[in-house]
Every structure is written in C-alpha cells, then in structure tokens.
Image (cartoon, coloured by chain):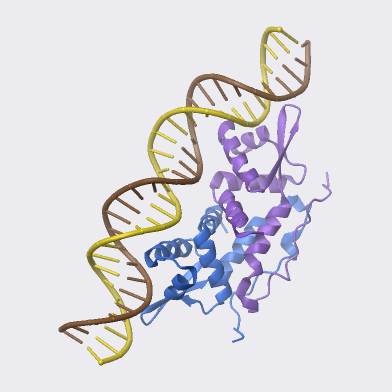
Chain colours: A purple, B blue, C yellow, D brown
DNA sequence: GGTGTATTTCAATAATCGTTGAAATATGGA
DNA sequence: TCCATATTTCAACGATTATTGAAATACACC
C-alpha cells in the first residue's frame, strides 16, 4: 500500500459518522447492507450518507452494488487489512515484531446465517 | 478504546506529513527522536512540525520529553495497538476471526543498537 | 405511461485544517 | 550576563470538510 492510499483510508475513517458507517458494514459482513438500512440505523440524512459513502468508496474501504432500488454497500476487508499492515510493517526497526504475528482477516468468508 | 479516541488517532494519522512523522518515530523505536532531527529528516519548518507534534500528542500517538535543549518525541505503541484492535475487534460478526489472531506489539522493547 | 420509493446531485454555508512568517520562550555554554 | 541554539506561540491566509435543503435521477410495480 502506498502512503497516499493510507492517508486516504485513514482520512476516510477519521470522522465520527463515517467510522460508524464503516464499522456497521464491517459488522454486517461481506454481504453488505442497503444504504437505506444504514441511514435508518445511524439516523443520517440520505444525502449526507451518500457523501460519506463516496468518501469511503474513493478510499477503497467500501464497495457498492445495485440490487433493485437499493444500493448495497459492503466493507472491503482487504483494504482494511492492507491499512493495518501498512501501519505496522515498519514498526520499531525490528525491536518489536508484531507484523509477522498478525494474520490478516480473510478477504471474504462464509456467513453463518 | 472509545470511538472518539479512535477518530482522534485516525485524524492525526490522516495527513501526509503527520503520517511521515509518526512512521519515522515508529521506526526510531522507543527511545524516540529530537524534534530537530525529525525536522531535518522530513524537511519541515519547525513551527509546522510543532503543530503536527501537537496533534499527534493530543491523539495520544506520541509522547514528548525534554533532554537539554531538545525535545524528544517517541511513538506510543500502546495506542497504535489499541487503535488496530479497535478497528478489527468488531469484524464480521465472527465470520472472519482476525482479532484473536493478532498479537499487539510490545509496549516497549530493548533496542538492538 | 404514471406513481412511489431509493438514492444521488447540486449549491450554499459554517467550521476546521495546514502552512507561513515573525516574535517569543527555554536551555546550555562562554 | 550575554549569546547561540532548539522549540513553541501567535495571527493570518487559502483550502478543505461536513451538513443542509431542494431538485434530479434510477428503478419497480401498477
């Protein structure tokens, strides 16, 4: 991951509403959630939410697909893991060794339900 | 870690110069680096650097101590690890299980040199 | 085609952010 | 005390950000 991408991802997450949105999607799992459901859950105006979705999407943290009238947003775990790897990979000049100990989250996973 | 703290930490890292500063300190290890050395390494004006140090410090990502005329800044690995834990701990409703697999970086470590 | 729902676009606004320059403060040494 | 170095404070500026309201677009159903 490039530094510019990391700054973009960090900036996208560095806002209360967007962090809420992202964590909601992270918890929703790979199948994602319709925009309207996110709006209801977080009590955000639909246009405000579009603005935040855009920023998350441009940072690569979220993917969108249409399903009928709804647009389904889903977290992109790959990018979250890349960001975490970027933050830890140059740690301590080897004085502490967390990067190797970390296993990235699977890109996608079977949903229990 | 509270959401507000996470937003503060993410916001502190979401800027090119600050991300450079933080990563430089992360790589410098627990003993830290004088402000002037950081300014030289990144070619930043001293007052600009103070501004960024302040933001990193207020976010808890960096600690400062005086040594003679210099002020030594050091990364706070504990907070970096707390942030990573916060981002991953609610992941996927258990669909992927990265949080348990991650070991935090040690708070401080002996420096090889 | 027409209606209702879901989401996005656009324009406007206040608030915050990053950088600069000049001046101030703090420390160590002669 | 006086001087040089290291860092911080302050005021100002243009740029970006988050939110709002009104209008537009996209789709499904009748």
Q: Which residue is at the front of the view, B51 or A1?
A: A1
Quarter of image, res A80: bottom right
In this rendering, would B99 be left or right of A95?
right
Image coords of residue C14 (percent x, y):
38, 38
In this rendering, would B21 be left or right of B100?
left
Q: Which residue is at the front of the view, A1 or B104?
A: A1
Q: Is residue B45 above or below residue A26?
A: below
Q: Can the viewer see residue A62 in this picture?
A: yes
Q: How many marks?
A: 0
Q: Is residue B59 above or below residue A110?
A: below
Residue at 59% across, 50% down: A13
Quarter of image, res B86: bottom right
Q: Quadrant of the C terminus of chain A?
A: top right
Image coords of residue A88 (percent x, y):
64, 67
Q: Is residue C4 above or below residue B71?
A: above
In this rendering, would B54 be left or right of A25?
left
Residue at 55% across, 35% down: A48
Residue at 68% across, 45% down: A62
In this rendering, would B67 be left or right of A50?
left
Image coords of residue D24 (percent x, y):
59, 21
Q: Can the viewer see residue A45 in this picture?
A: no
Image coords of residue B24 (percent x, y):
54, 70
């Amino acid at each position: 991951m490039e530094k510019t991408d990391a700054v973009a991802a960090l900036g996208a997450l560095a806002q209360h509403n967007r962090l809420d949105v992202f964590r909601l999607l992270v918890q929703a799992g790979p199948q994602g959630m319709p925009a309207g459901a996110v709006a209801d859950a977080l009590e955000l105006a639909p246009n405000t939410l579009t603005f935040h979705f855009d920023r998350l999407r441009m940072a690569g943290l979220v993917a969108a697909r249409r399903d009928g009238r709804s647009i389904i947003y889903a977290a992109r775990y790959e990018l979250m893991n890349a960001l975490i790897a970027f933050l830890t990979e140059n740690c301590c000049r080897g004085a502490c060794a967390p990067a190797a100990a970390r296993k990235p989250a699977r890109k996608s996973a079977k949903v229990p339900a």
